Image: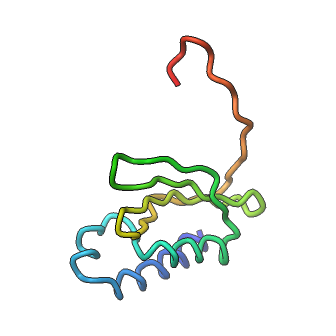
């Protein structure tokens, strides 16, 4: 709960300093330049990148988490380097990768 409040406060401050058009287009989530978002996740929450993938041709989807604190964050970054926090929470658990069964969709 505290993470959510402090991170949201940080992100809204970052949005306030961004151009108005960007802030209006990203109202459902908190957005800021990627370096600011990643610094906050690493320095304040001890999170590191657990995985990433492309989301179409215009953005990268990342999962950041901390095994020590259990916090996690889902971040999407666009081609202009703006990252938006899409979700965050706690009780993260690392899971071993399991191989897909032959013939089963991946």
| Direction right: furthest residue | 68
Residue at 24% over, 68% down: 25
Of residues 26 and 58, the one nearer the viewer is 58
Q: Position of residue 76 (x, y in %)?
A: 43, 59
User: In the picture, which quadrant includes the N terminus?
Assistant: bottom right
In the figure, 44 relative to 76: above or below?
below
Residue at 54% over, 11% down: 103
Residue at 67% over, 25% down: 99
Would residue 97 be found to the left or right of residue 85 on screen?
Answer: right
Q: Position of residue 75 (x, y in %)?
A: 48, 60
Residue at 34% over, 86% down: 16
Q: Position of residue 70 (x, y in %)?
A: 70, 58
| Direction bottom: furthest residue | 17
Task: Give the colour scheme of this rendering.
Answer: rainbow
Of residues 65 and 100, the one nearer the viewer is 100
| Direction top: furthest residue | 103
In the figure, 92 relative to 103: above or below?
below
In the figure, 10 relative to 82: above or below?
below
Q: Position of residue 2 (x, y in %)?
A: 60, 74
In the figure, 8 relative to 17: above or below?
above
Would residue 101 be found to the left or right of residue 5 on screen?
Answer: right
Number of callouts: 0
């Amino acid at each position: 709960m505290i993470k959510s409040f402090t991170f949201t406060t940080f992100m809204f401050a970052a949005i306030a300093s961004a151009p108005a058009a960007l802030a209006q287009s990203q109202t459902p989530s908190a957005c800021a330049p990627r370096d600011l978002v990643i610094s906050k996740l690493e320095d304040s929450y001890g999170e590191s990148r657990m995985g990433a993938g492309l989301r179409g041709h215009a953005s990268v989807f990342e999962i950041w988490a901390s095994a020590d604190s259990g916090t996690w964050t889902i971040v999407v970054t666009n081609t202009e380097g703006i990252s938006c926090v899409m979700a965050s929470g706690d009780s993260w658990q690392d899971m071993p990768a399991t191989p897909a069964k032959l013939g089963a969709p991946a």
